[in-house]
Amino acid sequence: MSRKLAAIAAALGLAFALPATGIADAAPTASAAAPGDLVTTSSTDFRTLNPQLSKAWHIEYGSTSGTDKPNTVSGTVIVPRDGRTGTRPLITYAVGTVGIDDSCAPSAGFPYGTTLEGNLIAQAIQRGYAVAVTDYEGLGTPGDHTYTVGRAAGTAMLDAARAAQKVPGARAAGVNENSPVGIMGYSQGGQAASWAAQLHKAYAPELKVKGTATGGVPADLMKAAEFNDGGLGSGLILMAAVGQNAAFPELKLDSYLNDRGRSLVGTIKKNCVAVNAVAGAFTKITDVTTKNPLEQPDWQARLAESKLGGTAPDAPVYLYHAQNDELIPRALGEGLRADWCAKGAPVSYKTIPVLEHVSGVIAETPSALSWLGDRFAGKPAAGNCG
């Protein structure tokens, strides 16, 4: 594998879950729990390259799909093992692209230390924050992962925070309804975090959200697809098509695929991002379809539903983008800033000089966490909209 393709394999996700093991599909519950209610809780491990003084629980919890239907989502709640019992801040965190198969879920990799984004999450734990990490809809629970469906990802994040406040062990460590909440994510996680920020006021107003740190955001899926078609990130376009079709089966993705496309979709559904990004690299949409679905009104309408910027977040936002992002053009981050600023949102925008997609989040995570720490401390965020 070339160095550039190896970088793309980690890009949008920074994660490699164990390929053939992990959390098996649980039996569907008889009736879905209310949003944020716990369905199951069990002890797990949160391991990274460096040992962490923490406790963790694997959870399943009620949430809401992209079509406003009740569903069940899995995730992980992590708290520092520092003896603190007073109310502590809680970050609801969404990882970048990991893949479609259940073995790719963040919670599947945490016990083995194979989810590399765990090293970024660990920085929050080291600051004394609790963290709730959603697996997203259909990743670790029955059904296909609705990859890039923004609304479903946003509700999964908000409900992960609600559920974390109900885990007995986390409550004993200071996670409760009075916890100041931060929303954080990058790339696919940035889309999720941005949607959570937009949905907070209407969907989960009881959460005490103090701010959102979000970066590398694919704010417009159509423009992201156009940018990546036939390029290094083209495998991610087909992953997104699989995710949209999982949420909206009336799109009938299979009816557009040729033999090569059906074979590639089969590979994508059974593997994680390290394989999928390489398998689909430099593939054009026309190489795998008999007709381009992105030119069809129903596909365009569904993708437009995930476009960000239509609602102003009700808490301050730290929005950042790498200058040389080779997967998600910087113009998408700048456009989201303009849309939110026009609606009166307090946005602090930052371009990360020189860096590209993966190095951007690695370099900027400490600053993003410091910004959230200031919000937890009650410091104002003026923003830099103009």
Image (cartoon, rainbow, N blue to C red):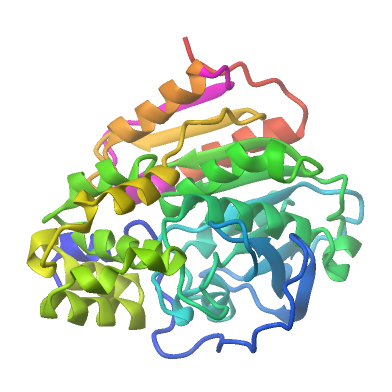
Residue 223: % across, % down: 26, 41
The magenta stretch spans residue 1 = no
Q: Residue at x 9, y 61 (%)?
A: 286
Region rendered in magenta:
343-363
Question: Which residue is depicted at the point 26% across and 81% down?
Answer: 267
Taking depth in this image into account, of 224 and 334 the one nearest to the observer is 224
Q: Is residue 349 magenta?
A: yes
Relative side of 148 to 298, left or right = right
Q: Relative to 65, does residue 338 appear above or below in the rendering?
A: above
Expressed as whole percent of the image width and height from the top left, the position of residue 12 reads 36, 56
Q: Nearer the viewer, residue 9 or 81?
A: 9
**Coordinates of residue 62 in the picture (x, y in percent):** 71, 66
Can residue 356 be seen in the rendering of this structure? Answer: no
Relative to 46, say whether 123 is above or below: above
The reply to whether residue 83 is in sight is yes
Q: Which residue extends farthest left?
A: 287
Total number of numbered discs in the rendering:
0
Residue drawn at (73%, 83%) of the image: 30
In the image, residue 348 lies at what x, y percent? 52, 24
Q: Name the image quarter holding residue 243.
A: bottom left
Q: Quadrant of residue 213?
A: top right
Image quadrant containing the N terminus: bottom left
**Horizontal arrangement in the rendering, residue 141 relative to residue 266 (left or right):** right
Using the image as rendered, state which of residue 302 and residue 271 is in the foreground: 302
Q: Nearer the viewer, residue 220 or 164?
A: 220
Residue name at image x 54 percent, y 24 percent: 347
